[in-house]
Amino acid sequence: MGKVENKANILICDDDALLLRELKELAQSAGYKTTTAHDGVEALALMREEPFDLVVTDLMMPRIDGPTLMARIKELSRTPPKVIAITSYATLDSAVTCLRRGAADFLSKPFAGEEFISTVERVLTADVIPHHAPDWGEIRKSFTLTLRQVEILKAFYLTGKSNAELAEELFVTVHTIKSHLKAAYMKMGVSSRAELLRLLREHSPSS
């Protein structure tokens, strides 16, 4: 299939030059007009010059990081672009913050080129849904979760903390956190924190 022209205008922001080049090539191969920035300061300058339909940004960057960039994007006079956050296991707490600030989705490193393009396509074609906290009562009922499992899931969603940090916050052992999360994962059909975060987002009220 040939490249489709005149698609959306995308800005990709990452301080990893190699990854930035790879993502730009993937986006251009899919037919998107693609601009790159090496940090949040450069990205903001570009957004002041021209409108973008989508911003794909890493969370850990010098000068202005991803969550701060998202907050600054809302201050632009024009309609803000949709945002996809790039994260890693170590920065899932930042991914949670970005989702609360309006990010449409996130990519967890490492990810394949096919996942990148499919996420871009999905976000660009989906309606913008305001962020709301998950309906924990509905989640508990849908997946037959225990009160303790819901408590741990809610703490993770609100903070993005590690198992050890959650154990300290909830005054339980790390083993307790792991065992309850493992049971919840099985009931919910997920295998990672990234998948869990997406599922919880899907169970947030749309209005």
Image: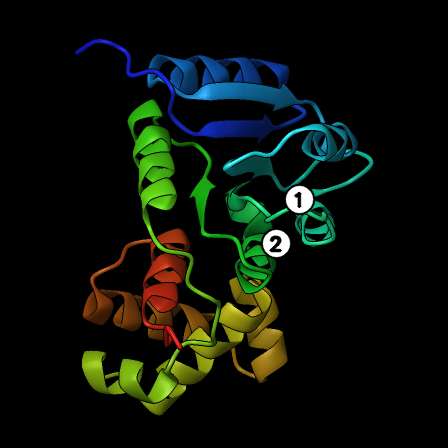
**Three-letter amino acid code of the residue under disc 2:** Ser
Please give left or right for residue 101 compared with residue 117 in the image: right
Contact (Cβ within 8 Å) of mark 2 with mark 1 = yes
Q: Nearer the viewer, residue 63 or 174?
A: 63
Q: Secondary structure at mark 1?
A: helix
Q: Position of residue 43 (x, y in %)?
A: 70, 31
Q: Quadrant of the C terminus?
A: bottom left
Quarter assignment of residue 2: top left
Location of mark 2 (residue): 94
Point out the tag, 2 or 1, that comes first from the N-terminus. 1
Vertical placement of 92 versus 183: above or below?
A: above
User: With 140 as the anchor, is 100 left or right in this view?
Assistant: right
Farthest left residue in view: 1
On screen, residue 21 above or below 80: above
Q: Which residue is mark 1?
A: 66
**Callout 2: helix, strand or loop?**
helix
Name the residue rendered at 37%, 82% in the picture: 135
Q: Residues within 10 Å of mark 2 (few under 14, many from 20)?
A: many
Position of residue 92 relative to residue 202, above or below, is above
Pick whichever, 186 or 12, lies toward us.
Answer: 12
Measuring from the top left, give residue 174's x and y in whole percent.
50, 70
